[in-house]
């Protein structure tokens, strides 16, 4: 039994056309990359997950909130933290290697 090979179709286009398409693709990639970063940084994390992320106790997390070390939002008894604020806190406590 013979298999039929797909036909290969080709087109000739000016280089300037290909250059414009490449520029537009790069622009779209940049827009999507920035949008993804913004969406990730604006995500809210539930308070109950924060101690595990930071490797601290629930009591220490309560102390951080009492001292307002990390910004948070509270709706009723639910507390949320923006991922960007948590990362900013972690970066501010970053210790460089020697």
Image: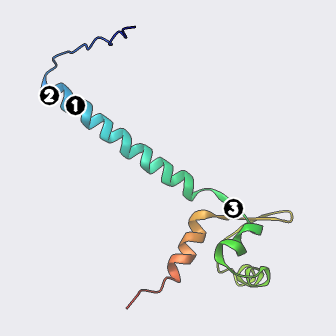
Answer few, some or many: residues within 10 Å of disc 3's Cα (few below 14, many 20 plus, some between 14 and 19).
some
Above or below, 27 against 67 in this view is: above
Helix, strand or loop at mark 2: helix
Nearest the eye: 64 or 96 = 96
Q: Give residue 74's position: percent from left, percent from top.
A: 78, 65
Q: CA distance from mark 3 to mark 1?
A: 41 Å
Q: Give the mark, 3 or 2, whose residue is nearer the N terminus.
A: 2
Above or below, 24 against 65 in this view is: above
Mark seen at residue 16: 2
Quadrant of the image occupied by residue 69: bottom right
Residue located at (67% from left, 59% from top)? 44
Residue 70 appears in view: no
Answer few, some or many: residues within 10 Å of disc 1's Cα (few below 14, many 20 plus, some between 14 and 19).
few
Above or below, 2 against 70 in this view is: above
Label 3 sits on residue: 45
Q: Left or right of 21: which side holds 58?
A: right
Nearest the eye: 64 or 26 = 26
Quadrant of the image occupied by residue 60: bottom right
Residue 17 appears in view: yes
Q: Give the mark, 3 or 1, whose residue is nearer the N terminus.
A: 1
> Residues at badges 2 and 1 in contact (C-beta under 8 Å)?
yes
Residue located at (55% from left, 70% from top)? 87
Label 1 sits on residue: 20
Residue located at (30% from left, 41% from top)? 26
Name the quarter where the N terminus is drawn.
top left
Residue located at (48% from left, 47% from top)? 35
Q: CA distance from mark 2 to mark 1?
A: 6 Å
């Amino acid at each position: 039994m013979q298999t039929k090979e797909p036909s290969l179709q080709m087109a000739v286009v000016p280089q300037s056309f290909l250059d414009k398409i490449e520029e537009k693709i790069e622009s779209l990639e940049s827009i999507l990359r920035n949008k993804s970063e913004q969406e990730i940084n604006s995500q809210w994390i539930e308070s109950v997950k924060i101690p595990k992320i930071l490797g601290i106790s629930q009591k220490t997390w309560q102390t951080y909130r009492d001292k307002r070390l990390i910004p948070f939002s509270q709706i009723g008894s639910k507390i949320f933290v923006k991922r960007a604020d948590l990362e900013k806190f972690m970066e501010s406590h970053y210790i460089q290697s020697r």
